Image: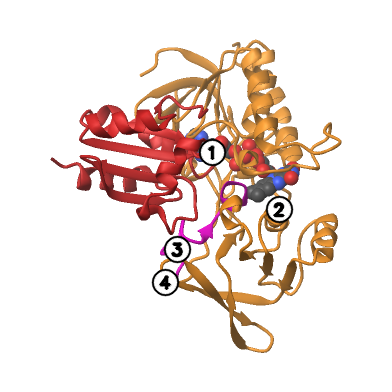
């Protein structure tokens, strides 16, 4: 057991967690931030972020997040990376935060654990992981130079990462289950105008096929009920997310998809525990929203700590 | 340079020396991206539990990474990181893309059991 008692323990070092860290450590609280990997969260895997204010030409995700991290550290946040939180337990007015190796004690906890990309669950996905199936265009894009690829999912992430892939690939076939595209219009317009792209809406991915590597995908036209095979060397998957909330099961109220329900101060039913960012139950998941919620929670934490005399 | 607590391999001479003087070696060749970072994290965690294995990372974009990229065992790899396990200088296992701690542990136990 780590014997220090922190005023605030933040779980997750993405935009939400780091913003909460900046605000709470600027209040001169003793703040610990734990991340199961390296700080940065989802933006660290994104090539270009164009809609975060203050960057007229857009910014690279890793660069943006390293600025967040430096800012949090400047105000004294203690950051411990590669520590996955397994459980949070309120005990006699304090919060025990368990990782595999250590238990930390805090007066408050801000959960900012975000979400992870969903898998497709179709035949071929596991077999070809790393051999044509990818979940990160920014990481693997250069390996697909001059190749035909498919992007599965036409939400913001799919289109944004598809656009990043265009630098490298010969063509992209976008596959979308719904009969329409649910993404920012500026992205839709840019991609539709590009001669390398092709959109198959109302299509379901049935399987990923090949020998040693991906060679094709089979899709079903949901309206016509017809199947067809499309030759591609790569399949990039952007079909939604699952919340990282398992470690709060039994403590927080979760919605039907597993996202954490809070009040408008971002507090769950247990006083002193807050949830912010993508892991929180809501409609819009963006960096600006994550930062805004973290700001609200940080101020609520300050007020809460005052009420308990900390 | 990769921002990890692992020892890095940076040139051909280091690779040669590493493989010639150690029976059990794991090299993870990647970038500081979301598919590679969890593998580096697992390696950092597992390193003390496997004192008979040398754990190294390698930047995918340096010239010396040609050694890993050019291995026949990596010929079909299309996802970072490329992780290669060497026993007495020979490749005994190679994986492409993200692997979790459990998967890495299983490989380490299998390929370096003696
Ligand atoms: C491809 C893609 C492109 C995007 N582009 C944009 C964009 O252009 N503009 C925009 O505004 N938004 C964009 N988004 C959305 C944006 O990335 C998210 O809304 C934002 O990252 C949410 O921040 P967060 O801190 O809540 O969660 P995350 O960024 O997911 O961070 C959560 C952190 O918590 C850590 N963690 C998880 N579980 C645990 C645990 N048990 N213990 C310890 N740590 C844990 C994770 O390692 C991670 O670092 C994009 C998302 C994707 C996937």
CB under 8 Å between callouts 3 and 2?
no
Residue position marked by numbered label 3 in the rendering: A128
Q: Do pointers 3 and 2 mark residues of a single chain?
A: yes
Magenta span includes B28: no
> Helix or strand or loop: what does disc 2 sit on?
loop
Residue located 27% across and 34% down the image: B19
A210 relative to B32 in the view: left or right: left
> Helix or strand or loop: what does disc 1 sit on?
loop
Residue A3: x, y in percent? 40, 13
B57 relative to A197 in the view: left or right: left
- Callout 4: few (<14), some (14-19), or many (20+) C-alpha neighbours within 10 Å? few
Q: What are the residue bounds of the magenta stretch?
A: A124-140
A39 up-or-down from A280: above or below: above
- Callout 1: few (<14), some (14-19), or many (20+) C-alpha neighbours within 10 Å? few
Residue A87 shows in the view: no
What colour scheme does the image use?
Answer: by chain
Q: Is mark 4 within 8 Å of ligand 1?
A: no
Chain designation of label 2: A
Q: Do pointers 2 and 1 mark residues of a single chain?
A: no
Residue position marked by numbered label 4 in the rendering: A211
User: First in sequence: mark 3 or mark 2?
Assistant: 3
**Residues at marks 2 and 1, CA–CA distance in whole angstroms:** 18 Å
Which disc, if any, is residue A167?
2
**Residues at marks 3 and 4, CA–CA distance in whole angstroms:** 9 Å
Chain identifier for the red-coloured part of the image? B
């Amino acid at each position: 057991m780590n014997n220090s008692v922190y005023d605030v323990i933040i779980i997750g070092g993405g935009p939400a967690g780091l913003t909460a860290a900046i605000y709470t450590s600027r209040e001169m609280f003793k703040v610990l931030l734990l991340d199961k990997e390296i700080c940065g969260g989802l933006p660290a895997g994104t090539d270009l972020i164009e809609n975060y204010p203050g960057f007229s030409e857009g910014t690279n995700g890793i660069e943006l997040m390293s600025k967040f991290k430096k800012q949090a550290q400047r105000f004294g946040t203690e950051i411990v990376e590669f520590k996955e939180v397994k459980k949070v337990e309120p005990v006699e007015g304090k919060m025990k935060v368990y990782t595999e190796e250590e238990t930390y004690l805090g007066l408050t906890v801000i959960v900012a654990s975000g979400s992870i990309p969903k898998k497709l669950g179709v035949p071929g996905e596991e077999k070809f992981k790393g051999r044509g199936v990818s979940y990160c265009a920014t990481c693997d894009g250069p390996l697909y130079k001059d190749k035909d690829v498919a992007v599965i999912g036409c939400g913001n992430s799919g289109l944004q990462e598809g656009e990043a892939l265009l630098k490298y690939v010969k063509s992209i076939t976008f596959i979308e289950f719904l009969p329409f595209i649910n993404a920012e219009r500026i992205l839709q317009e840019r991609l539709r105008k590009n001669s390398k792209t092709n959109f198959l809406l109302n299509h379901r991915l049935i399987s990923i096929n090949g020998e040693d590597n991906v060679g094709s995908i089979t899709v079903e036209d949901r309206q016509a009920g017809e199947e067809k095979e499309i030759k591609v060397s790569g399949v990039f998957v952007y079909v939604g997310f699952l919340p990282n909330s398992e470690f709060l099961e039994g403590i927080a109220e979760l919605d039907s998809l597993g996202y954490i329900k809070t009040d408008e101060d971002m507090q769950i039913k247990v006083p002193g525990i807050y949830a912010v960012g993508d892991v929180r139950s809501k409609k819009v998941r963006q960096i600006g929203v994550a930062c805004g919620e973290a700001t609200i929670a940080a101020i609520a934490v300050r007020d809460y700590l005052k009420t308990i005399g900390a | 340079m990769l921002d990890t607590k692992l020892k890095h391999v940076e040139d051909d001479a280091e690779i040669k020396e590493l493989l010639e003087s150690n029976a059990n070696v794991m090299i993870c060749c990647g970038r500081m991206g979301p598919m590679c970072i969890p593998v580096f994290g697992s390696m950092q965690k597992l390193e003390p539990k496997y004192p008979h294995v040398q754990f190294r990372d390698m930047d995918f974009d340096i010239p010396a990474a040609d050694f890993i990229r050019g291995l026949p065992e990596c010929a079909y790899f299309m996802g970072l990181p490329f992780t290669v396990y060497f026993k007495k200088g020979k490749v005994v296992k190679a994986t492409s893309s993200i692997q979790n701690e459990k998967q890495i542990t299983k490989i380490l136990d299998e390929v370096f059991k003696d």
